[in-house]
Image (cartoon, rainbow, N blue to C red):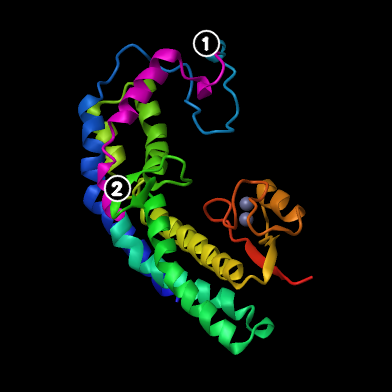
Amino acid sequence: MVTDAEKSMAATLAAFFVAHRAEIVAPLLAAYKPTTGKQAHHAPSVQPGAAQCACHACKSPAGGGLDLEVQQELDRLLLKLDITSFEDLPAQVQADLLKVAKSGALLGAEQLASDMSAEAYDSLVNLVNERAVALAADRSAAMVGMKWVDGELIPNPNTLWRIDEGTRALIRSDVSQALQEGWSNSSLADTLMDPKHAAFSEARANMVARTELAKMDMQANTAAWKESGLVQEKIWLLAQNPCDQCTANAEQGAIPIDDEFDGGEMEPPQHPNCSCDLAPVVGD
Ligand SMILES: [Zn+2]
Ligand SMILES: [Zn+2]
């Protein structure tokens, strides 16, 4: 079930990227003017956590070694990206999210079946099936930094891993390099329009689908546990080769079902490509 939904959502996202990448980058390209005589002292390092440049001209704090003027121009250009088309995505991905929300809710209920009467189990399954619709709607909107209120999408800037913000971040590195090295407008256009560009690639579509559906699955599990009234606590189960944040979540042991883990998430995934799991603590 998850695999079919994943394929379907990845295909939807990949098609979306192909259909919209030109309109997304067009306003940025229209505003981009190659600078002359502003050659970089060095290869730009804009990746978070990248080694600091040793060049004395780049000792300014923050900004990854970018001088203030370049930084300001970069910010101005990134704001030009047209990310309004991302608002089409929630409706397109909702059916796949709903499939996974329903299977996740059912699985969450099944885990508790031996602790419940057949009657209580049946009513739990009905209840969480209804809740799954709302969960899928919430998650689909959150993917583009929105939420549904009375059938309308309105901004919800606090959501994590937004596809539109992720796109901005992935484009940022190329525009920064273009500004510093004085690329022509058409070189920047070629780079941004490359089908393999990280922002619009099939690999990214797959990653987003996998991560979003994993989140949906876990949220639906947890919703079923909560509705059952049998589960007061949850435990973060680490995947292989975990990062420090996931490790910290797991080291908390059992925490109340309504609490956030150390990393600020209610359930895995903690971040894109996280494959940690969650277990309910039943009874005492
Ligand atoms: Zn992790
Ligand atoms: Zn993890």
Please state the total of marks drawn on the protein image. 2
What is the quadrant of the N terminus in the image? bottom left
* Circle nearer the N terminus (1, 2): 1
Q: What element carries label 1?
A: helix
CB at disc 1 and ligand 1 closer than 8 Å: no
> Which percent across, then down, holds residue 80?
28, 30
Residue at image location 34% in from the left, 63% down from the top:
94
Residue at image location 37% in from the left, 53% down from the top:
141
Res 179 visible: yes
Q: In this view, does 259 lie above or below 52?
A: below
- The range drawn in magenta is 60-89
> Which percent across, then down, holds residue 244?
69, 47
Q: In this view, does 162 lie above or below 205?
A: above
Residue 11 lies in the magenta stretch? no
Q: In this view, does 58 lie above or below 216?
A: above
Viewer-side residue, 215 vs 72: 215
Q: Mark 1 points at which residue?
A: 57
Toward which corner of the image does residue 227 lie, by quadrant? Answer: bottom right
Amino acid under disc 1: Ala
Q: What element carries label 2?
A: helix
Q: Mark 2 points at which residue?
A: 86
Res 2 visible: no
Classify residue 280 as left or right of residue 151.
right
Mark 1 or 2: the one toward you: 2
